[in-house]
Amino acid sequence: MAESSSISSNGTGSPADTAEVADAAHAAGTGTLADPLADIGVIGGSGFYSFLDDVTEVTVETPYGSPSDSLFVGEIAGRKVAFLPRHGRGHHLPPARINYRANLWALRSVGVRQVLAPCAVGGLREEYGPGTLLVPDQLVDRTKSRVQTYYDGEALADGSVPQVVHMSFADPYCPAGRRTAVTAARGQNWEPVDGGTLVVIEGPRFSTRAESRWHAAQGWSIVGMTGHPEAVLARELALCYTSIALVTDLDAGAETGEGVSHEEVLRVFAENIGRLRPVLFDAVAALPETGKRDCLCASALDGMDTGITLP
């Protein structure tokens, strides 16, 4: 990386030192607090660690600990983008050990307000085979041990206490972001599945045959391991969040043989990176400007006393 910098936030979510953050932004060559390091975030999943080529590495610390990795900040079509490898470089973090709270907080702390989240998933219907691109509109949580809120009433390190907040989550994904992603895929001659339900399991193991059949019988579309609590934490920070799911295996079709393997997932994802990259580039370029968001995500915290100040 040509340059690097670091940013920290105190326990209330405000920058620990405004001058320090501004200096870090200048050191990174990308501006000040009034001119954020980035306004769009991309959280990459399996096999997607090189989304940006010419980047500045920014280390961010949060009241919730360290994110999965540094943020890698660059520019696409005139938009400032921060990429975060979800599992860390080298894929060293299993789904249940990812610090989702730190990841989303870190993105918001550098100015991100819209998040695109490409991920590898298994298909739960025959027609959703490897290479299918699906932009879900619903989510089912089947995880077991993940912290999934900022507003838990537990004191932060500085003694501030977040209020207990009950967040509306009927529609878990940003409608504007979904439309943008679908349009971007069609513009690249890749007809996506517009809508569907992502069921998120604990992992890191894949589903048993019985579990796959049960998921399919519920009418769910795809199965993954990282979409929750990522989506709800984004909503709790008033971030727009859009999942873009690439099917790497026919999960429900594993009736015979050995079933899906990690090697298969990485192979199929790698085979499709060349198709997914321009879709994401076009989606980034077409997302609304931060100040012009008029979706439910942007107003998610309106009228709420959260007890903490967001970065």
Image: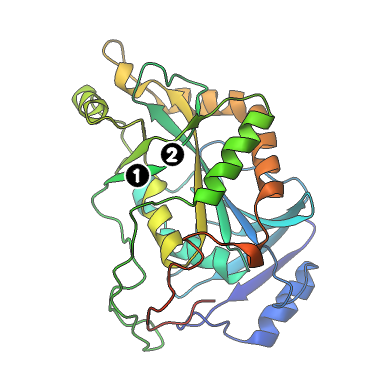
Q: Residue at x 31, y 80 (%)?
A: 163
Q: Residue at x 78, y 74 (%)?
A: 26
Q: Residues within 10 Å of mark 1 (few under 14, many from 20)?
A: many
Figure quadrant of the N terminus? bottom right
Q: CA distance from mark 1 to mark 2?
A: 8 Å
Where residue 55 sits, quadrant-wise, is bottom right
Observer-nearest residue: 236 or 294? 294
**Mark 2 belongs to which amino acid?**
Pro
Label 2: which residue? 136
Q: Residue at x 58, y 68 (%)?
A: 60
* In the depicted structure, whether residue 239 falls above or below residue 272: below
Report x, y in % for residue 216. 26, 26
Q: Residues within 10 Å of mark 2 (few under 14, many from 20)?
A: many
Proximity of marks 1 and 2: CB atoms separated by less than 8 Å: yes
Left/right placement of residue 129 relative to residue 146 reads right
Question: Is any atom of residue 88 visible in this view?
Answer: no
Report x, y in % for residue 80. 72, 58
**Mark 1 belongs to which amino acid?**
Leu
Report x, y in % for residue 175. 50, 49
Q: Residue at x 41, y 66 (%)?
A: 236
Label 1: which residue? 139
Residue 25's disc is: none
In the displayed image of the protein, which residue is found farthest to the top?
256
